[in-house]
């Protein structure tokens, strides 16, 4: 476990191409997209704690990382390429982080 690299950009691209409403990442779970009222696997393997830390640090602004040290949840958004705006919610309960990434409907409709 942990031998195959997890590439967040590829997971996001899968979510967008499938027109899924969200990408959900959690420790010890295979990345999933929410499509047609159900979650479907979209990653190569369950995520490790190290994977989640790498993903969180790669997309989370410094101020939000500081906020996460003091709270159980934080939200922010970021641009993905030139066409999409993505909203992110990071929850951290019982030492188990979860990341939910959703496309902004306006950027999706512009496609």
Image (cartoon, grey):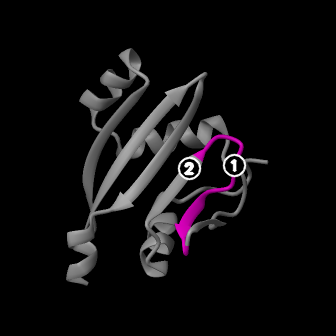
Q: Nearer the viewer, residue 35 or 96?
A: 35
Q: Position of residue 7 (x, y in %)?
A: 53, 60
Can you identify the residue that label 1 sits on? 29
The answer to whether residue 108 is left or right of residue 52 is: left
In the image, residue 107 sits, relative to residue 25, either above or below, namely: below
Q: Is residue 94 magenta?
A: no
What residue appears at the point 60 percent right and 60 percent down from the top-left corner?
A: 32
Asked if residue 63 is positioned above or below residue 56 in the image, the reply reads above
- Tell me the SS state at disc 2: strand
Q: Is residue 82 visible?
A: no
10 Å neighbourhood of mark 2: few (<14), some, or many (≥20)? Answer: many
Q: Are marks 2 and 1 in contact (CB under 8 Å)?
A: yes
Relative side of 44 to 31, left or right: right
Q: Quadrant of residue 28?
A: top right
Q: Which residue is mark 2?
A: 25
Point out the residue furthest to the right here: 1
Q: Which residues are magenta?
A: 26-36
Asked which secondary structure carries label 1, the reply is loop
| Residue positioned 55% across, 41% down in the render | 52
Mark number displayed over residue 89: none
Is residue 52 at all visible to an observer of this figure?
yes
Q: Quadrant of residue 38?
A: bottom right
Residue 96: x %, y % from top left = 60, 30
In depth, the one of 57 and 16 nearer the eye is: 16
User: Residue at point 34% right, 40% down?
Assistant: 60
């Amino acid at each position: 476990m942990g031998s195959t690299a997890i590439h967040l950009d590829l997971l996001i691209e899968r979510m967008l191409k499938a027109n899924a409403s969200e990408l959900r990442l959690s420790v010890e779970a295979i990345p999933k997209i929410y499509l047609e009222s159900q979650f479907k696997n979209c990653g190569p393997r369950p995520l490790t704690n190290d994977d989640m830390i790498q993903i969180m640090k790669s997309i989370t602004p410094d101020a939000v990382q500081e906020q996460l040290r003091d709270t159980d949840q934080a939200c922010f958004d970021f641009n993905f390429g030139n066409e999409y705006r993505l909203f992110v919610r990071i929850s951290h309960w019982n030492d188990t982080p979860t990341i939910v990434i959703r496309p902004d409907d306006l950027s999706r409709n512009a496609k």
